[in-house]
Amino acid sequence: MVSFCKSTFLDACWLWLLCALGVPVLGMNDNMFFPCSTSYTNQTQDILQGSRDISGKELFQFLTSNWFVEGKDAINGRGLMPEEEFKELQETLKCLKPQLNTSQLIQQQGYPVEEYNIHTEDGFILGVQRIPNGRKQRGDHARPVVILQHGLFACSSNWVSNLANQSLAFILADAGFDVWLGNSRGNTYSRHHETLKPYQKQFWYWSWDEMGKYDLPALIDYTLKVTNQEQVYYVGHSQGTTQAFAELSQNNNTISDKIKLFVALAPVAKVANIYGVFRSISTSSFCCFTKDVLSALHQYEFLEKTFILNTLAAETVCGDPHTAGICVFFLEVFGGFSSSNINRTRVPVYIGNNPAGTSIFDVEHYCQMVLSDHFQMYNYGAEENLKRYGQLIPPMYHPKNIDMPVAFFSGGQDKLADVKDVNWIRKQLGDNLVYDKFIPSYGHLDFILGLDAAVEIYDDVVKLFKNFG
């Protein structure tokens, strides 16, 4: 009953948001929720760019302002798309099935898939998918192993959401690799624990600290055991890099010795220079306020998969070329990518699987880092820090301790992995940074969803893996 109430509450929030955006949902009339504001102030650009600190009230007003309603037309390009192209897009969207999960997306493209449950030292059960070989290959011999780890709010579908020649997981499988798709604790595929249940606070009382400490070692050890290999290649995007930087900086040779090469897409360690909506959220009272409100409601999960967003909105709003621009707009504002570098026909698939959920404490951890300008462990408060860490302030992570080859792919338009923050981790790694590619036009999501990512990044990743073989 508790779980049902939480889901109902969150679905109601998404319904209200869709209404506020001016989107007709299942014939609802305009009076079902309070009407949208019809005016907005110059706070819009401040919030989008993160150019000043804002209050939670201002952010709320922004999210309900008519700017979004006007903005959807601009992003959608209404009136600019040729009629033939519009009809073609409409037919393509009709054929999509955004509700497909990761394994189904893999099978849809004609690849073999296997599913595993991996137990961590602290009791979490992680759902993992595996593509053992390519479409035109036999899986009867050992192949080099690659682990792909997604970012914040995401899941393993990120690596298989585009077509076969555009998705990193498929490209690696066809190139002769045994590909494993990780899922962080708490997301759609990793909502199980040996003793805890998702309605309990303790189930969610973790951040990316624990992902690095427990999830990463468990995933690597399990893949090596199943494949009978000695080392893996590791590719992380966003938070997938954060947890790796954290654990590898702990002088943990038992992990670093098992990784041939660590490829960091949109590398994230320090985040003091992030900009856009996430900066506005992180530097205002909104972040702590949201955590406190959700905690009071016993809602410790944040942006989990819901029927309203991931099914209804994905199929109706994102699946209709008249309103698909709203979904593109949200991806661009909250994730960041080059709008000319996205396959618009795949947007329903992106939204159908993401956001996939995380802990409110995981989100708060990033908020803490924005304010502190440190790459450090979660701050529980002085008293609890003393119990857990033996000191009043959280310990720092020191990436300069990492002793293994690392390859960087970073972007000039990345709101969440800003150039200044990436430069810091770059200097920390020193000579261990064996490859460093900067793509000026790339935003945060281009690395996993970009139309030209195969040319700009994935071909290089395959070459790097073969060179380090």
Image (spheres, rainbow, N blue to C red):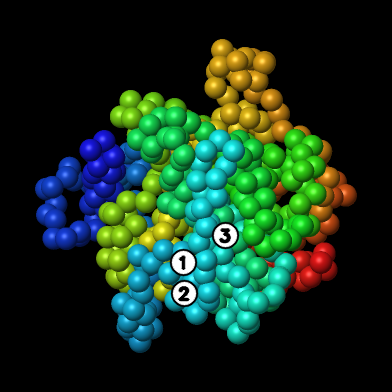
Q: Secondary structure at mark 1?
A: helix
Q: CB of mark 1 within 8 Å of CB of mark 2?
A: yes
Q: Secondary structure at mark 3?
A: strand
Q: Secondary structure at mark 2?
A: helix
Would residue 323 be visible to someone looking at this image?
Answer: no
Mark 1: give few (<14), some (14-19) or many (20+) Cα within 10 Å.
many
Determine the CA span between mark 1 and mark 2.
6 Å
Determine the CA span between mark 3 and mark 2.
14 Å
Quadrant of the snapshot with the C terminus: bottom right
Vertical order, 102 against 34 (above or below)? below
Q: CB of mark 1 within 8 Å of CB of mark 3?
A: no
Q: Nearer the viewer, residue 286 or 115?
A: 115
The residue carrying mark 1 is 103
The residue carrying mark 2 is 107
Q: Quadrant of residue 22?
A: bottom left
Q: Amino acid at mark 3?
A: Leu
At x 57%, y 69%, the residue is 131
At x 72%, y 67%, the residue is 144
Q: Amino acid at mark 1?
A: Ser
Q: Nearer the viewer, residue 221 or 256?
A: 221
Image location of residue 224, percent across then percent down = 69, 56
